[in-house]
Image: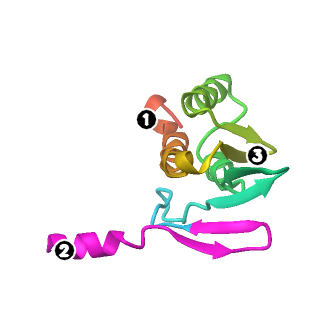
Amino acid sequence: MKIENLIEKSKNAFVFQKTDKGYTIKTDATFLNGKEIDIRLEERAGKFFLTDNKSTLKYMNDLYELSSSDVKMCISNVLKIYGFSISGGTLLAEIPNENTFMDKLFDFIMCIGQLSNMFAFFDKP
């Protein structure tokens, strides 16, 4: 392994693909089951958002009892940390301006990771 190869590999860490609603942001980030994390960049009512196309809650539904009060509280606390929300099953992160885009994108990926790996906080998922 060479450091130059690692640097070269990271140059295309994010690939943007145009869709009818905005862009899909392709990354190598995956859920533990190997499924790709779905990240979208969309404009809604003149504001820009990162969304997950409901993929995080769909993944979590297989692992957790989402109606459980302790799971709901954990989800709420993680969302509070990042200042994100869930609407209609979709994880949403508003991008207030261009300067915050990369920070929000990295936070979005970390938030999805924390939500999907909440089992670390429970005796039983």
The answer to which of marks 1 and 2 sits earlier in the sequence is 2
Give whichever of 44, 69 is nearer the camera.
44
Q: Position of residue 88 (x, y in %)?
A: 81, 44
Residue 20 percent across, percent down from the top left: 79, 73
| SS assignment at label 3 | loop
Q: Amino acid at mark 3?
A: Gly
Residue pushed farthest left? 2
- N-term mark: 3 or 2: 2
Image quadrant in which the C terminus is located: top right
The crowd level at tag 1 (other Cα within 10 Å; few <14, some 14-19, many 20+) is: few
- How far apart marks 1 and 2 lie (CA) works out to 35 Å
Who is closer to the viewer here, 5 or 29? 5
Q: Nearer the viewer, mark 1 or mark 2?
A: 2
**Residue 101, magenta (yes or no):** no
Residue under pointer 2 = 4
Of mark 1 and mark 3, the one earlier in the sequence is 3
Q: Please, is residue 19 above or below residue 70 in the view?
A: below
**Dot 1: element:** helix
Disc 3 versus disc 2: distance between alpha carbons?
Answer: 41 Å
Q: Residues within 10 Å of mark 3 (few under 14, many from 20)?
A: some
Q: Which residues are magenta?
A: 1-25
> Of the residues shown, which amino acid type is indicated by label 1?
Ala
Q: Which residue is mark 3?
A: 89
Q: Are marks 1 and 3 in contact (CB under 8 Å)?
A: no
Q: Which mark is residue 63?
A: none
Q: Nearer the viewer, residue 79 or 60?
A: 79
Instruction: State the separation of the CA atoms marked 1 and 3.
Output: 22 Å
> Which residue: 73% across, 74% down?
19
Q: Which residue is mark 1?
A: 120
Vertical side of 14 occupied by 107: above or below: above
